[in-house]
């Protein structure tokens, strides 16, 4: 279930330079690059002459040059030069994908270009607020359907089993009795989890040592089809979250899941530090700890995908903890239905 008329993260803005990058997105080969003037471009990664990958080419003043026979293509996909030939056939062009640079990310549209509404791109101003939310970002290829990672992010009960030594920490009983508030939105869901008088997980204590129990929160917003915005933290038990000072832990994570194929995706994420903002070591510590958790998730979901490839999903059952996941899947299904009413 890949929604075509939607924005996905194609790359971090600082990933893409004048050296072309090949990336398969929504089952299509894409070449990403910047012109010599710095504009970001996305084209089908296949020269319209003999099908050679443009990602093996070179960016020139006129455009990206195919290094098989020298044809040059502009950012709009049209061929602008053929060596030793003045007439350029109209057919000499490649597909161009709308690409928008926003919040330090490059957003790509794979559906009808006429429907590429930039207002549909989620807002995430924290990437540009390094004073209050210094962050580190990265990308990890994962061999699973992108919605399986959405499922994973919205099922916080798995933290106690998959991440006991990192972001989970608490005994399963603490996660199972968390106070949950789940609401539907126009384009997804919001999930709020509160765990009062709970042990601080190892990640929190490694970053901000707590002397005792904490009141812990996890807020998630899923924006269909492929984004989860997370704000998590903790303060000493009994303290007012809005006014409590140190020791406290504040962390924001942006999760963007971009389909590569039907059984693989790119996991773009950023981790932001909101409690010790003038200390780069604190930001590095959060990033290091979250990377451990993401690596643990990768092992699990890739193994899960292997079983689903073998046995399918029809025999699987849901339980109470699946409510956010089920609502998120329904939001994606509704999005698909709007695009394909027949």
Image (spheres, grey):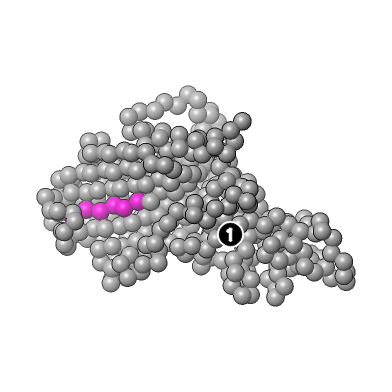
On the question of residue 177 being in view, the answer is yes
Magenta span has 194? Answer: no
Residue 227 vs residue 80: left or right? left
Q: Position of residue 80 (x, y in %)?
A: 77, 68
In the rendered image, residue 249, in percent from the top left (x then y), is placed at: 24, 58
Q: Residue at x 47, y 64 (%)?
A: 104
At 50% across and 25% down in the image, what residue appears? 314
Please indicate, yes or no, whether residue 267 appears anywhere in the rendered image: no
Question: Magenta stretch?
Answer: 230-235
Residue 234: within the magenta? yes
Q: Residue furthest top?
A: 315
In this view, the residue in front, 113 or 295, is 113
**Residue at (23, 39) in percent of width and height:** 178
Magenta span: helix, strand or loop, mainly?
strand
Q: Give x and y (percent) for residue 262.
A: 58, 41
Which of the two residues, 249 or 133, is positioned nearer the viewer here? 133
Question: Percent position (x, y) of residue 198?
Answer: 18, 45
Position above or below: 140 against 197? below
């Amino acid at each position: 279930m890949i929604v075509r008329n939607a924005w996905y993260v194609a790359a971090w803005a600082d990933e893409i330079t004048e050296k072309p990058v090949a990336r398969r997105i929504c089952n299509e080969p894409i070449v990403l690059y910047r012109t010599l003037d710095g504009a970001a471009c996305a084209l089908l990664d296949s020269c319209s002459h003999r099908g050679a990958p443009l990602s093996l080419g070179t960016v020139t003043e006129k455009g990206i040059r195919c290094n098989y026979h020298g044809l040059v293509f502009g950012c709009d996909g049209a061929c602008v030069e053929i060596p030793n030939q003045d007439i350029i056939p109209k057919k000499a062009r490649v597909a161009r994908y709308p690409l928008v640079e926003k919040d330090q990310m490059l957003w790509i549209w794979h559906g009808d270009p006429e429907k590429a509404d930039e207002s549909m791109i989620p807002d995430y101003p924290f990437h540009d607020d390094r004073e209050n939310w210094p962050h580190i970002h990265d990308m990890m290829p994962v061999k699973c359907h992108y919605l399986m990672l959405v499922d994973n992010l919205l099922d916080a009960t798995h933290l106690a089993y998959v991440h006991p030594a990192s972001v989970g920490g608490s005994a399963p009983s603490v996660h199972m009795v968390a106070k949950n508030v789940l609401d539907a939105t126009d384009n997804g869901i919001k999930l709020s989890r509160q765990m009062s008088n709970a042990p601080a997980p190892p990640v929190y204590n490694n970053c901000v040592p707590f002397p005792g129990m904490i009141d812990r929160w996890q807020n998630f917003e899923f924006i269909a089809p492929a984004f989860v915005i997370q704000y998590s933290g903790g303060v000493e038990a009994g303290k007012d979250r809005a006014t409590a000072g140190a020791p406290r832990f504040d962390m924001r994570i942006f999760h963007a899941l971009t389909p590569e194929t039907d059984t693989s995706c790119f996991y773009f994420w950023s981790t932001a530090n909101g409690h010790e903002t003038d200390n780069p070591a604190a930001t590095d510590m959060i990033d290091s700890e979250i990377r451990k958790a993401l690596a643990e998730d990768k092992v699990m979901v890739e193994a899960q995908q292997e079983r689903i490839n073998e046995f399918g999903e029809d025999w699987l059952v849901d339980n109470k903890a699946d409510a956010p996941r089920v609502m998120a899947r329904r939001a994606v299904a509704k999005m698909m239905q709007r695009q394909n009413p027949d």
